[in-house]
Amino acid sequence: MTAIDPTAHLTAEQIEELGRELDAIRDEVIADRGEKDAAYIRKVISAQRKLELVSRGVLLFSLFPPAWLIGTAGLSVAKIMDNMEIGHNILHGQWDWMRDPKIHSTTWEWDHVSPSEQWKHSHNELHHTYTNVIGKDNDLGYGIMRVDEDQRWHPFHLGQPLWNFINACFFEYGIAAYDLELGKNLHKRRRKNPEFRARARAVGRKIRKQVLKDYVIHPLLSGPSFLPTLAATFTANLVRNIWTHSVIMCGHFPEGVQVFERRSIKGETRGQWYLRQMMGSANISGSKAMHFMTGNLSHQIEHHLFPDLPSNRYAEVAVKVRALFEKYELEYVTGPLPKQVLSAWHKVFRLSLPNKKPKVKTPDREQELIAA
Amino acid sequence: MTSTALRSRARKLLEMVTTPLLPSDYLDLVSPLRAGADLRGRIEAVHPETGDAATVVIRPGRGWRGHTAGQYVRIGVDVDGVRLWRAYSLTSPTDRQDGRVTITVKAIPDGKVSNHLVRRAKPGTLIQLDQPTGDFVLPQAKPAKVLYLTAGSGITPVMGMLRDTGFDDVVMVHCAPQPQDVIFRSELHDLVADKKLRLTEVHTDTDGMLDIARLDELVPDWAERETWACGPAGLLDAAEEHWSEHGVQERLHTERFRPSIVVAGDGGEVTFSTTGKTVDAGGATPLLDVGEEAGVLMPSGCRMGICFGCVTPLKAGAVRDLRTGEITEAEPGVLIQTCVSAAAGPCDIER
């Protein structure tokens, strides 16, 4: 959809061959999946719970500033782990193969205001099936932003750097609203739809529980440390929201990531589907700690190719995937977090303004001139 | 306010503290065997019995309700990271002082769980437990004469009975390929030496399979005995026929370990048990399509195996993953992605 199609040099046969090679990578991991992987997710879950317990324990004394700092930092990390490496990946069914009903996509609930069930629909089903297809994948700008030149500009978009910043701070609420398709459903007629009302009630219940826990019960338990604990949980949620928002922006917004037209996915083959995931996602480079804290969404390309493979395997898969990018002469968009975040924000700012007038009239016109 | 109401209030408050998790999720980190937890057990030792059988000593959680001799327990063991459930007879007496229970497992060829338990299980491992169950048990009133007719690992529930309750007149006929394959052999011979048991071993490698008609010669008064039989289907079928022919079938109690064996095929009859619909399905058609075609309201999502929006319990039979060819057999708690699974033989989908 971008002026130059970066996959134009590939023949249909090559694309199907690419698909087969990716299937082989997937099969290899599935055949090898086992005890070590199961031990990994159990260890992460147990570590997250212990960290959260200890942090909340420390916050009981948060009147004392060092306790506030340690507790807030610990709780922020615990919330990020719950959201990213644990919640996001379990809800993708990455650990369903273990047949442990406690670590399963059908039973897991996360420390997040969007109920798992609704998020699975909007994220796993809509976003992962229709990745970067304008009009089908609402993750493209979350319905409040313009993220590609081909989207029509509207004066509303002038404010999008501000919307994006507010969205980052309250990201979990943004996601809940997004899962509800609030913008579309707030019209008078749709508001009354019983199915929408039931989902809205479920979100309401979840928000009530989360808010009660973080902003009432835990501060109350802290007694004289009521206000510092309140501030600490608010800060931890803010840190978690800004962090996840940044990581997620890096997944599909940086420069170099392609978007697709609705008609381009009609009758898409397996190979073409894979190719769209490859061109529609971007990675974050960095240390093991960085990959862990992003829930391995730093391997966004690999995650989009194989959303149900255990996250702890993406790093090894990435080596093989990257080799395929090179073999097929495709651009593997990646970079360190600051660079990718900056690139995504740059796009948010740039597209808040209407497109610049093209210097030449149209590419077609140019072709004609050359031909003449 | 009653104490129950108080407790329930306190529990609600605790749940508010730990939402979206439950207080038990945190307690499980430190005390997985406590009262009130999901029932689990800890493997404390594994003792070899024969070349391919071992006794597993398990300390059950506080919620364990105890068993009756002859009963079995379902256990959930993580093998290569995958939780698999199997049923094993309890071989320990019911009044064991240390509160432990034992199961005795024979490794069957290609048996994932049995081989794991016999050869690789480590003390300290947590396993999942169900409460003991089964009606292959001794009656309240002691029968005067008892016959135990067993073969192979069929001896395990009977060993639980032998260790639990002594009778005045007990005869046992046990079949195993060779003497060294007889599980609990030395203990059985001790019982024989103490005149608590009369034992006939049939070594099928040399003697051939037990011909049920030989019972007249081995145990002349078999028809007068209350009989408990456990072993392969062939033996039990022959015994049932034999006891019926002599009109004493009410004295025979049998236990079958493997009521049905799943044979994975290509396509088959699919039953949607909740809606009560049954249709024939090809081996290449996703079960989601099969269900929708049959008018069953199926949960669905991406239809390509990535969103896990269509997972549904597989109650019986086997299915094939259309992407990898992998076969999944029904077991309690097994969920399948209907959009990428096809019938591999007859199967039952809970919809």
Image: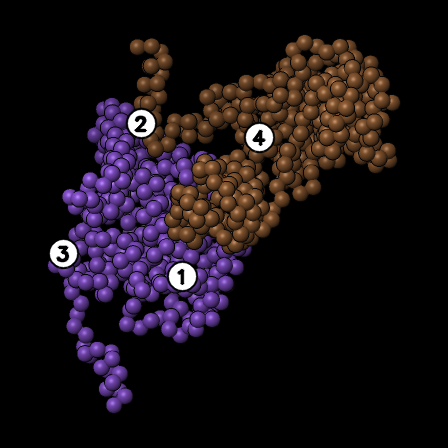
Chain colours: A purple, B brown
Q: Residue at x 53, y 52 (%)?
A: B282
Query: Which residue position holds label 4?
Result: B75
Seen from the viewer's position, the closer of residues B245 and A41 is B245
Mark 2: give few (<14), some (14-19) or many (20+) Cα within 10 Å. many
Q: In terms of secondary structure, where does tag 1 sit?
A: helix
Indicate the quadrant where residue B4 lies.
top left
Query: How much space separates mark 3 and mark 1, taking CA atoms?
Result: 33 Å
Identify residue for label 1: A273
The residue lying toward the viewer, choosing from B153 and A215, is B153
| Amino acid type at mark 4 | Ile
Q: Are marks 3 and 1 on the same chain?
A: yes
Q: Is residue B275 above or below residue A219?
A: below
Q: Secondary structure at mark 4?
A: strand
Residue that numbered label 2 is attached to: B16
Say whether mark 1 and mark 2 are on the same chain: no
Which quarter shows the N terminus of chain B?
top left
- Camera-near label (2 vs 1) is 1
Disc 2 marks a residue whose amino acid type is Met
| Vertical position of residue B99 compared to residue A96: above or below | above
